[in-house]
Each structure stands twice: as C-alpha cells, then as structure tokens.
Amino acid sequence: MADDGAAQITGVLEDDVQAIGLALIGRPPEDMERAAANVVAMARAGTDERRALAEAGVIHSLTIMCSREFGAKTQLKGAVALGALCSNFSISMDESKLYVYTAAQDEALRRGAVTLITPILTAWQPDAQAAAANALADLCFRNSQVRKAMTNMEACRPLVNLLHSENVDVHKAALAALRAYAVEAKLAKEVEDRGALSQVCKLLDSDKNEVVARALQLLWALAGADSTKSKIAKERNGAVLSALLLCIKSTDAPKRAAAVALVRKLSTIPEHRQEVRLRPHHSPAALRARVPACISGGAVLP
C-alpha cells in the first residue's frame, strides 16, 4: 500500500496511524514527506482509514506542511496528502468511485489550508502548482464553505493562469479545481470573466484524453447561461462544436460522456440544436445510444 516515497506500512491500522502521526511532528522534512505519502495511500484505501487518520490529528500536521516554513517539495507532499483525505475528485474520472469526507474538508478549512495552499499555485515548479490545484479541487468538491474561502483568496485567478501552462499535469489539475469550483452560477461567471473560456477550448486539442475530458466537463459547468453557450459554440469560428462532436466518437468513456453532456446542453439553444441535427451521426437518438444510462449526464456533478 506504500505510495511514492513512502516507507512500507504494516497493514495494522492503529499502528500505522500512530506511526504516521508521530512522523509528521517535529521530524526532518524527508520523514514528514514519507509519512504524507503513506497518508495518501491509506486515505485512498477506504473510509475507515480516512476517519482514523483524521481522528489522529494528521490534518493539522499536513496543513502545517503546506506553510512557507517548508520547501516546495514538502509543501506539495502535504497538499497532496491533505487533498487525498478530503476527496479523490482530482484523480477520479469515474463518478461511481468518488468519495468525499466533508469533516476533513471542514477541519482543513479551519486550520487555514486554503490560505496556505493558494499561494503555492504561483510557485515556479509545475509539480508544486499541480499539487496545489489538485488539493484545492479535493478540498472544495461539494463544499460551499471551502469555495467561499477560495473566492476570498482570489484562487480563481491563478487557477485560470495555470491553464496557459505547458505542463499536462498542471492542465489536468487546474481544470479539475475550476470544475469543482464553478458549480454555482456566480462562480462559473467569475471563471468566465477571468478569461478561461478561450483557453479551455484550446485544450480540447490536447492529445491527452483526460485533459480533453476535464476541459469538456468544465465547459459543461460554465455553460449555464445561454450567452455562454453561444460563446462556446462560436469559439474559434465554430470549430469547437465540430471538435466536441468528434469527441463523441472517442473510445475513451469519460471523454465521450463529457462531450455528449456538453452537446446536449448547447443544444438547448435552437440554432445549435439545428447544427447538431444536420450531422446524421450526432442526432439526439444517436447521442443517447452512445452514453450508458448509468452515467449522470456525462459529467461528474456536485
């Protein structure tokens, strides 16, 4: 169960939690980083592990790791572990496998995690940027209070800036964080006003399926108002609509499902619906046939 950089854990929950808790307090950064990696492995193993870690006080220790008194590597390890305790939204494209631990999110918020993690978004190291964005995605997933704290910290601005990165992991992380954030109309409008729309549409050209799927999911979240739907459909002289229709033919299930969901949403405007209907392979019946009923509209919903 050991993760990257983690010492082997025994599998005895009480012993492992105690050892991790001790390793996170007053130890050299290398020891804290190994302990944080073990937190990630255990947090992703199950509910009992997450609860035991939280009750042992590791959230406080992990939050401290995110502070500027530590180097970038220690900060990113702490941020990743903190996020893993809160949810797995940043790494899961399968809605049936998502988890969220609201109590951990709330404690992390009280400990100042959003205040400490947001500045890491502007670090010069791409791995630190990605870790911070992923942590914020996991912290704010289905949690309005964390989203409010992110608004107060103006986290949206650096997250949108990260969409211009040349690093694929940063793209995925920023898209996940913005998708988790933009679940309310006013927050979606903020993301759009920050200039995200054009860059998100450009990321549809990525050769990485997860980047494209996350970009489609974010566009779905942003496309609440009819005015935004029209902007998306007209972006790049209409090429975006053609591109996402091609995504429906993808063999990658999350990418295909996200494309179908967005087409359905854009098609609530008659002129867009007409354009879709002119393409025989993308009729409403064909769209329904391409997406299993078990997928909730093709997007991970809050």
Image (spheres, rainbow, N blue to C red):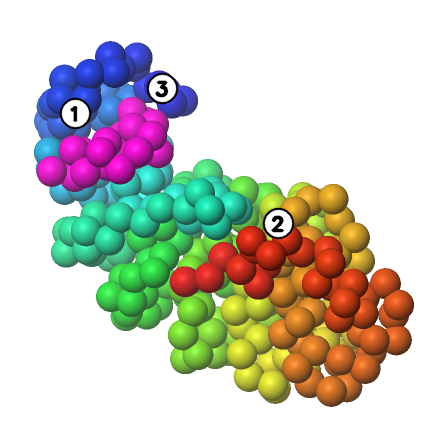
Quadrant location, the N terminus: top left
Looking at the rendered structure, the secondary structure element under dot 1 is helix
Residue on which disc 2 sits: 254
Q: How far, Cα to Cα, is label 3 from label 2? A: 27 Å
Provide the secondary structure element on which disc 3 rests. loop
Tell me the CA gap for discs 1 and 2: 35 Å
Q: Earlier in the sequence, mark 1 or mark 3?
A: 3
Residue 17's disc is 1
Q: Magenta residues?
A: 37-55
Q: Is residue 223 above or below residue 33?
A: below
Name the magenta segment's main secondary structure. Answer: helix
Q: Is residue 108 left or right of residue 241?
A: left
Q: Residue drawn 13% across and 27% down?
A: 21
Against 71, is 283 above or below? below
Residue 45 locus on image (x, y percent): 33, 30
Density class for disc 3 (Cα within 10 Å; few <14, some 14-19, many ≥20) is some
For the C terminus, the image quarter is bottom left
